[in-house]
Amino acid sequence: MPIRVILRKAASQVWVRRGYFGRLMLLPMVATAVIGYLQDLWYEPNAEEPIVQLLTKQAFWMALYGIIGALFAVVIHRSILLDERVSPSRWFFRLSKREITFTGWSFFIGGGMWLIFAIGAALSTALAIPFAIWCSDLFSRIGKTLPWLKNLGETILIGVAGSVTGFLVSYFAARTSLLLPASALDHHQRLAWAWTISKPHAMRLTFLVGVIPLASFSFQALWPLWIDDLLWNPAHQVLTALVSCSLLILEIAILSLSYRWIIESAPTTQSPAIVEPIP
């Protein structure tokens, strides 16, 4: 699977359809901005808040974001793969078996990624204590000689743990994400199918649909911190939603074209047909 070709074609597809995608993302952009504003408005930091209540609130907000993103992703996939056009003012309210299936797979894949991340974080924390004990003398001596390397042990641990966890999260996404464009095209496949058909392309998919979205997510999480005090909150939410929806379109285009390339190169016994839209 040619990574450069897919990235170039994804950027080209998004650019060619920029007017359509621009109109299409108005509704999810507004909805995302409103949800972000309400989330900030209702956020009350409370150290005594039960962890279950805190997690429930976070799950609620994440579910809203996930549903909006899933509905948006379906029409992007169908536009890229079928050249389908829908009314920018109506698609958001369409909820058929296709959208429900796509949303279900989205939550399954997203939940799996967060579970892997949580396990990686827990293991990293568990390993941090013995690592600090075993290497404390070594890094203490290094710190005395080279003060700028005083926190070398923690830096190494964080770097290794973060890299391994990020790879595992990306790998899981790579092996399962082909279910999303398949569902958008009404091809009802199982997890075993995605795991099998993605196997020959696992590492390249890990980069395309794992590493790139994780880098995008990290950027979206960090860059608002730089402008948080510079913009009025509603304007900040609108700008954040604009960046988020724009990057999401590009990420979906990359996944769509990866899916097309894999399906067209796979044996006919494994690959559903990608058909042109019926007039």
Image: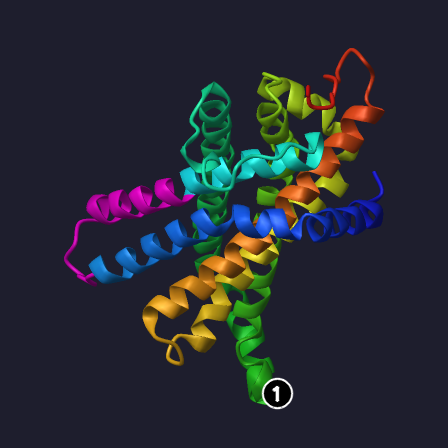
Q: Position of residue 259 (x, y in %)?
A: 72, 32
Residue 167 can be seen in this image: no
Q: Is residue 268 visible?
A: yes
The answer to whether 129 appears left or right of 272 in the picture is left
Residue 52, relative to residue 47: is it above or below? above
Q: Quadrant of residue 264?
A: top right
Q: Residue furthest left?
A: 48
What is the total number of numbered labels drawn onto the structure image? Answer: 1
Residue stretch rendered in magenta on the structure: 44-65
Prevailing secondary structure of the magenta residues:
helix
Q: Report helix, strand or loop for mark 1.
A: loop
The percent coordinates of residue 85 (x first, y second) are 61, 35
Residue at 17% x, 61% y is 46
Q: What residue is drawn where x is 55% and y is 63%?
A: 219
Residue 40, position in %: x, y? 28, 61
Q: On the rendered image, what quadrant is the C terminus found in?
A: top right
Q: In the displayed structure, would residue 49 be above or below residue 154?
A: above
Mark 1 — residue? 146
Q: Amino acid at mark 1?
A: Leu
Q: Is residue 159 magenta?
A: no
